[in-house]
Image: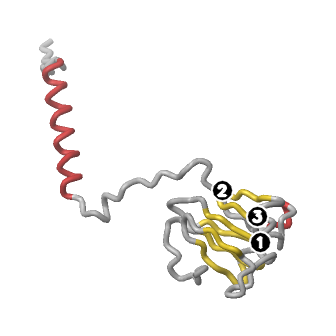
Amino acid sequence: MNSTKKHRPALTSRRLLGILSAATMTTASLFALSTPAQAQAVCIEPEPAALYLYENRNGSGDVFQATASVIDFRVFGFNDKASRVWNKYDCRAWVLYDDNQFEDRHYCIRPNQTVDLHREAWNFGDKISSVKKLTGKSCSGYPTFG
């Protein structure tokens, strides 16, 4: 019986280094060819990143900390209670709604923005019933708080 084996070169440290170098150069080339839109920096949120809703205009009283969308604040006993809101996210905007299920009148709060909801310009104090966390910084398509 005649058996032939294919010779496979041993994976030496020198050969492995060559493979890794080629992979590194390929990866570096991809990044060099990327446009700024494709190679956006990763946004790291501060700790604890959250949307803070305060019962009173001065930040006192009950505080609700949202890290995900809330479809109905009645579940948490915070419906129509917020007088001040602070978006402590660097990379996410939020939309605040005056009805549950993300319905009716709404405003978008930008990253790192603090809003007195009782200001006459929007008259939104003690009216928030649901909030939606957006996927990015933009409030595009939503009315904003100033």
**Residue identified by numbered label 1:** 83
Name the secondary structure under disc 2.
loop
Q: Report, in whole angstroms, how far the alpha carbon at label 1 lies from the one at label 2.
A: 19 Å
- In-front residue for pair 55/103: 55
- In-front residue for pair 20/133: 133
Residue depth check, mark 1 versus mark 2: number of the one nearer the observer: 1
Residue at point 78% right, 74% down? Answer: 100
Mark before the other along the chain sequence, 3 or 1: 3
- Image coordinates of residue 22 in percent, x first then y, are 15, 37
Outermost residue, front side: 58
Specify the label residue 54 is tagged with: 3
Q: Report, in whole angstroms, how far the alpha carbon at label 3 lies from the one at label 1.
A: 6 Å
Q: Report, in whole angstroms, how far the alpha carbon at label 2 lies from the one at label 3.
A: 15 Å
Residue depth check, mark 2 versus mark 3: number of the one nearer the observer: 3
- Image coordinates of residue 28 in percent, x first then y, are 20, 46
Is residue 112 toward the left or the right of residue 70 in the image?
A: left
Outermost residue, bottom side: 121
Mark before the other along the chain sequence, 2 or 3: 3
Residue at point 54% right, 50% down? Answer: 46
So how many labels did they put on this image?
A: 3
Labels 3 & 1 near each other (Cβ < 8 A): yes
Name the secondary structure under disc 1.
loop
Is residue 90 toward the left or the right of residue 49 in the image?
A: left
Label 2, residues with CA under 10 Å away: few <14, some 14-19, many ≥20: some
**Residue identified by numbered label 2:** 67
- In-front residue for pair 34/57: 57
